[in-house]
């Protein structure tokens, strides 16, 4: 704390990211990173781009990356926006679209950065409770709002929404922006990008950090109709005209084009998720249905905080949320390699 801080800084409640520990021989299952590594073509692209051209600024529009994303999803380039991770993309859209006279809406149990952005930009918000089964209930969202945002699948629960429910929301909520945060959609959800052409108030965000295993490069993007993308570009160019460096752009293009590697990794994670869910269930856990690269589970006889601490003592780190109280019994467990998942289960057998 410094006496030079403004009152604004004093009042901020920053986001707390998942721990990035320095411990050796650690089974790290707490931040939903992809355990299978980036596309070899992406690594080769980084190697090829790592030369004298690094003295030059990158393309401020990342046009080639936008083109690769547009080709993959079948959308025009002017409907694609890219940024330094999907968190930056989200920050720009909160600033540009959600500073309204009415509160924005999002689930009460969801990605906790949404509240942080509201505090940073002075945005009023209201949370909407999840159903008893921890699913998002879009039909209950009131029409009088300044915007709506939710992840699909939701985080940290992992539960997906069918595309029909999202479209029903768009059909009745036409006067404000709807943002679908699809960080985990590739692991079993239905992308709302298919709806963009029909709904001018829909913006879909995604990331290269999860299914394309490039969390260390920070690449995120949004897809929406051109007027929404123009708004994001205005904000980006008023903040940082060069959010993506040359290495990130090169790797992102290669990762988007390497469909075979992408599908192989996603299929492997889904198979491991199903096996992990079955193994946890056999050990007395309730595991919520997940369409993400993690599971959300609780044990009837053991507190989540106690289990997380016990796992840590055995070199296995998972994510535990003390707040809100409703999910304090749960652990969020990243799906790892077969060896990592085995280590987790062996450690749980010791604790249980």
Image: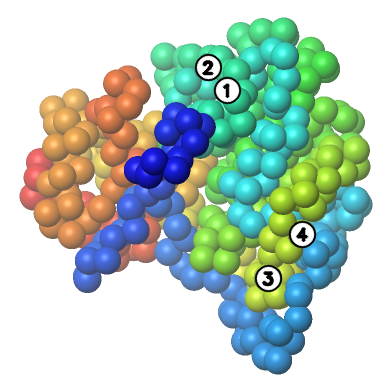
Query: Where does label 3 land, which residue?
Result: 245
The circle drawn on residue 106 is: 1
Query: Where does label 2 land, which residue?
Result: 127
Determine which quarter of the picture holds residue 156.
top left
| Sequence-wise first label, 4 or 2 | 2
Residue 229 x/y as whole percent: 84, 43
Quarter of the picture holding the C terminus: top left
Alpha-carbon span between mark 4 and mark 2? 33 Å
Residue situated in front as seen by the camera: 198 or 99? 99
Q: Residues within 10 Å of mark 1 (few under 14, many from 20)?
A: many
Tell me the element at label 3. loop
Tell me the element at label 1. strand
Residue drawn at the location 22% of the way across and 60% of the way down: 343
Residue drawn at the location 29% of the way across and 39% of the way down: 320
Q: Does 130 sit above or below residue 212?
A: above
Residue drawn at the location 51% of the way across and 32% of the way down: 8
Alpha-carbon span between mark 1 and mark 4? 30 Å
Q: Residues within 10 Å of mark 3 (few under 14, many from 20)?
A: some
Q: Does 143 sit above or below residue 296?
A: above
Quarter of the picture holding the N terminus: top left
Determine which quarter of the picture holds residue 149.
top right
Residue situated in front as seen by the camera: 309 or 264? 309
| Sequence-wise first label, 1 or 4 | 1
Q: Residues within 10 Å of mark 2 (few under 14, many from 20)?
A: some
Query: Where does label 4 land, which residue?
Result: 241
Tell me the element at label 2. strand
The mark lying in front, picked from 1 and 4, is: 4
Alpha-carbon span between mark 1 and mark 2? 5 Å
Alpha-carbon span between mark 4 and mark 3? 11 Å
In this rendering, position of residue 148 left or right of residue 350: right
Is mark 1 in CB contact (under 8 Å) with mark 2? yes
| Sequence-wise first label, 1 or 3 | 1
């Amino acid at each position: 704390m410094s006496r030079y801080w403004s009152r604004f800084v004093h009042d901020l409640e920053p986001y707390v990211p998942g721990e990035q520990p320095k411990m050796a021989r650690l089974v790290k299952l707490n931040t939903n990173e992809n355990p299978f590594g980036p596309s070899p073509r992406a690594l080769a692209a980084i190697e090829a781009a790592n030369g004298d051209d690094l003295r030059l600024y990158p393309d401020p529009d990342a046009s080639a990356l936008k083109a690769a994303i547009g080709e993959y999803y079948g959308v025009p380039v002017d409907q694609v926006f890219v940024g330094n991770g999907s968190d930056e993309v989200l920050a720009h859209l909160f600033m540009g679209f959600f500073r309204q006279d009415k509160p924005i809406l999002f689930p009460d149990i969801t990605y906790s950065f949404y509240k942080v952005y509201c505090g940073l930009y002075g945005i009023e918000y209201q949370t909407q409770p999840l159903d008893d089964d921890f699913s998002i209930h879009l039909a209950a969202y009131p029409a009088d709002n300044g915007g709506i945002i939710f992840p699909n699948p939701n985080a940290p629960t992992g539960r997906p929404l069918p595309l029909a429910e999202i479209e029903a929301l768009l059909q009745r909520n036409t006067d404000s922006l709807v943002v679908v945060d699809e960080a985990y959609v590739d692991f079993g959800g239905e992308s709302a990008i298919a709806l963009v052409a029909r709904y001018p108030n829909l913006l879909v965000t995604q990331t290269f950090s999860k299914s394309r295993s490039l969390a260390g490069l920070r690449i995120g993007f949004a897809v929406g109709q051109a007027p929404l993308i123009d708004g994001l570009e205005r904000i980006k160019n008023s903040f940082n005209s060069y959010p993506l460096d040359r290495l990130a752009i090169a790797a992102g293009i290669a990762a988007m084009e390497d469909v075979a590697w992408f599908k192989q990794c996603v299929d492997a994670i889904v198979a491991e998720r199903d096996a992990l869910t079955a193994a946890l269930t056999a050990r007395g856990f309730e595991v919520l249905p997940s369409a993400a690269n993690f599971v959300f589970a609780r044990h009837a006889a053991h507190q989540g905080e106690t289990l997380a601490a016990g796992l840590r003592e055995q070199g296995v780190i998972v994510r535990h949320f003390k707040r809100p109280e409703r999910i304090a019994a749960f652990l969020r467990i990243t799906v790892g390699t077969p060896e990592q998942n085995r280590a987790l289960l062996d450690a749980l057998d010791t604790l249980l």
